[in-house]
Image (tube, coloured by chain):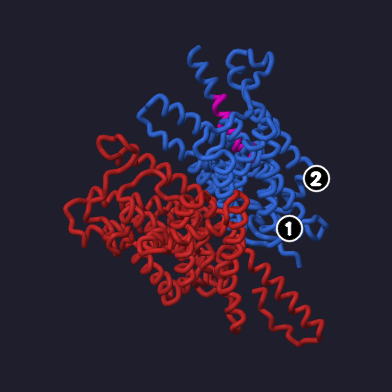
Chain colours: A blue, B red
């Protein structure tokens, strides 16, 4: 029984660590499919993390915090969209600039808002919701049905995103724009608009993912607290072969590496936990190189579209 | 992509040259203005903030030396990004290559004993170049052999290097008895000597200047360098001309990684003297800004490196005197990148409007416009 309990708590921890990757991934999958390489997601998540805390502090509810986070991150994503789609600047460089901007803005304003030496304000954060009945089921209840609301939301979003991507006209347009923007243009699809909207969607979800980091995993903001999760979400999109279900699995694999690592550190085993932390990145490289099933990027990846 | 941003525009006349010099100038000025806006927004007089920033970085020998100390790694990482870009590659892995270089050079600097400085120091520095180079080469190999985009792999390799370094300094390389997660100090024979007495400015800065010279001579004065640039400008044409793009991509990633490796090496052997986690405050990504601002040219990188060195070293003083968080320089830096990278669009739009106006006024200046190239 003891082992079952610890497996269940491990699964629960896995979902908790996977959630920011899945949330951000559900937005990123659309912009990626539309041919946008958005490495700025790290900075957008960071903005979301701070805005989440600030919003929760100002408006007194974690949900308002999350909405505020989504709003702020989407503003940043519109800067990214303008520069990469309209100005046609190099997406990679703009993304890098957005990350630096996110770090600068959040660190500066966190100090101004919360001060340096004062204790972080007590704010409303996302607390655990035990689903009635289901959470009482032995093992399964502990593993799956005692999470905070955003974890459930992340899981629910996967089939929705998958449906939109593969079963609707919208999804078809997004995919077509990523594969062959020119052809889309000739049949009257507004390539710029599709890209703007998908980048906005990635911004909204990055913001939510950031709010999850600051209001779901913790209940305060610290400098650079996203700590590479944005890049990892990007990796999950690639490792998950640009499909929402794949991203869910990738998120859970990456999350498991992190969850095991915490356990190893706590247990004080001889296995260096750093090697587990490397796992998500190594797996992504393997996926890109085709060692674990080739991950293929859209044909028009990272290419600005130039209308004639 | 990456390569084209750094591509020199044919300067047809002094007006063009003025534009070329003017863009970085305007970009920096505009970014500083935005920074001033943010400073004012958080309730500090921007004038006082910037005054303390420049006082803190340029007011005396010591602060100027400190500026060059901060400039040194930035030059290396900028060269790293710029070199790969010249070959049409996007190297976002300078941070990881910096750590890989530091791991190689620190290992030899600590555990190789009984050598005179004249041998030990060059060996350790070369190891740093090779370590960073191999880490860059790995990304290059993954690209040419498996088609894995270096944009993603270099980012992933950053984190692998960070975690590996963390493993080393908490495990095999930890300083006995193991109270702190850091390595022992480097042997005295492997430490970069100070070049200005009483300051922290060390030989690494001279090596950075030499690296700029190497960058210039290799790219513009050697056949291989010429090939590298041709591959960067037009890979198809390069192949028709019998240039092997695979070989050039691998070499470019090795040298780019090597430059970044030297950033880590000079930071450890010149300043920190021992290795610990996160000793680089993001020099890898700063290098991108420096390379872009410098237009990928040797002199440009030097000037942009010093400018960012000023920001970095003055930011401490600004935080102390004016209570403006150091992080404000990241905002300035981000806007420098944004303005430089989008300048092409706005000058193009300006030129187009001018041409249209000329055409309307019956001007004959058609046909020979290569502004779109």
Q: Quadrant of the C terminus of chain A?
A: bottom right
**Residue sticking out furthest to the left:** B114
SS assignment at label 1: helix
Q: Eyeballing the image, is A198 above or below B371? A: above
Q: Nearer the viewer, residue A109 or B233?
A: A109
Residue at x-position 38% and y-position 68%: B209
Q: Eyeballing the image, is A230 above or below A1? A: below
Badge 2: residue crowd in 10 Å (few <14, some 14–19, many ≥20): few
User: Could you tell me which chain the residue with mark 1 belongs to?
Assistant: A
Image mark for residue B255: none
For the stretch drawn in magenta, what is the main secondary structure? helix
Residue at x-position 45% and y-position 72%: B219
Left or right: where does residue A256 sit relative to residue B171? right
The residue range painted magenta reads A11-26
- x%, y% of residue B316? 45, 52
Which residue, given by chain and number where applicable, does mark 1 sit on? A181
Is residue A17 on the magenta stretch? yes
Left or right: where does residue A112 sit relative to residue B191? right
SS assignment at label 2: helix
- x%, y% of residue A210? 61, 39
- x%, y% of residue A13? 54, 26
Image mark for residue A169: 2
Determine which quarter of the picture holds residue A127.
Answer: top right
Q: Nearer the viewer, residue B274 or A12?
A: B274
- Whole-angstrom CA distance, mark 2 to mark 1, is 16 Å
Residue at x-position 35% and y-position 61%: B62
User: Could you tell me which chain the residue with mark 2 belongs to?
Assistant: A
Is residue B239 on the magenta stretch? no
């Amino acid at each position: 029984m003891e082992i079952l309990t610890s497996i269940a708590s491990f699964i629960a921890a896995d979902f908790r660590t996977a959630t920011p990757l899945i949330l951000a991934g559900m937005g990123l999958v659309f912009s990626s499919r539309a041919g946008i390489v958005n490495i700025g997601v790290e900075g957008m998540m960071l903005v979301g993390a701070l805005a989440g805390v600030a919003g929760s502090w100002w408006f007194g509810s974690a949900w308002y915090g999350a909405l505020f986070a989504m709003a702020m991150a989407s503003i940043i994503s519109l800067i990214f969209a303008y520069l990469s789609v309209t100005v046609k600047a190099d997406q990679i460089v703009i993304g890098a600039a957005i990350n630096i901007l996110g770090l600068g803005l959040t660190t500066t304003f966190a100090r101004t808002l919360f001060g340096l030496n004062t204790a972080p304000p007590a704010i409303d954060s996302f607390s655990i919701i035990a689903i009635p009945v289901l959470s009482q089921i032995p093992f399964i209840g502990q593993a799956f049905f005692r999470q905070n609301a955003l974890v459930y939301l992340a899981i629910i979003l996967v089939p929705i995103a998958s449906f939109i991507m593969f079963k609707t006209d919208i999804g078809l347009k997004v995919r077509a724009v990523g594969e062959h923007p020119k052809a889309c243009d000739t049949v009257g699809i507004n390539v710029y608009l599709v890209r703007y909207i998908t980048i906005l969607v990635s911004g909204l979800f990055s913001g939510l993912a950031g709010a999850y980091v600051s209001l779901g995993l913790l209940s305060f903001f610290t400098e650079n607290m996203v700590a590479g999760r944005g890049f990892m979400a990007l990796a999950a999109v690639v490792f998950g072969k640009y499909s929402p279900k794949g991203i869910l699995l990738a998120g859970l694999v990456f999350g498991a590496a992190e969850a095991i690592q915490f356990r190893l550190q706590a247990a004080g085993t001889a296995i260096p936990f750093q090697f587990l932390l490397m796992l998500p990145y190594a797996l992504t490289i393997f996926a890109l190189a085709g060692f674990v099933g080739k991950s293929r990027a859209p044909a028009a990846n990272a290419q600005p579209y130039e209308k004639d | 992509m990456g390569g084209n941003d750094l591509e020199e525009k044919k300067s047809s006349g002094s007006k063009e040259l003025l534009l070329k010099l003017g863009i970085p100038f305007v970009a920096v000025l505009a970014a500083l203005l935005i920074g001033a806006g943010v400073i004012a927004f958080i309730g500090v007089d921007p004038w006082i903030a910037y005054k303390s920033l420049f006082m803190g970085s340029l007011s005396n020998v010591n602060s100027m030396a400190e500026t060059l100390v901060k400039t040194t790694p930035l030059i290396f990482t900028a060269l790293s990004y710029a070199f790969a870009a010249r070959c049409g590659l996007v190297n976002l892995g300078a941070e990881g290559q910096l750590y890989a270089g530091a791991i190689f050079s620190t290992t030899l600097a600590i555990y190789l004993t009984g050598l005179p400085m004249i041998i030990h120091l060059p060996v350790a520095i070369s190891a740093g170049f090779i370590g960073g180079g191999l880490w860059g080469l790995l990304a290059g190999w993954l690209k040419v052999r498996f088609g894995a985009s270096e944009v993603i792999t270099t980012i992933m390799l950053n984190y692998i290097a960070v975690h590996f370094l963390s493993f080393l300094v908490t495990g095999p390389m930890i300083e006995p008895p193991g109270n702190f997660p850091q390595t022992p100090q480097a042997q005295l024979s492997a430490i970069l000597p100070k070049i200005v007495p009483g300051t922290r400015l060390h030989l690494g800065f001279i090596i950075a200047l030499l690296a700029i010279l190497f960058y210039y001579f290799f790219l513009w004065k050697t056949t291989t360098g010429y090939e590298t640039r041709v591959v960067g400008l037009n890979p198809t044409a390069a192949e028709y001309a019998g240039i092997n793009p695979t070989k050039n991509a691998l070499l470019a990633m090795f040298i780019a990684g090597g430059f970044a490796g030297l950033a880590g090496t000079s930071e450890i052997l010149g300043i920190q003297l021992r290795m610990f986690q996160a000793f680089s405050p993001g020099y890898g990504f700063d290098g991108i800004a420096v390379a872009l601002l410098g237009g990928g040219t040797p002199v440009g990188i030097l000037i942009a490196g010093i400018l960012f060195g000023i920001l970095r070293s003055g930011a401490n003083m600004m935080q102390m005197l004016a209570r403006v968080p150091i992080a404000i320089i990241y905002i300035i830096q981000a806007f420098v990148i944004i303005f430089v990278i989008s300048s092409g669009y706005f000058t193009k739009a300006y030129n187009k409007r001018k041409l249209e106006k000329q055409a309307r006024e019956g001007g004959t200046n058609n046909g020979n416009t290569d502004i779109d190239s």
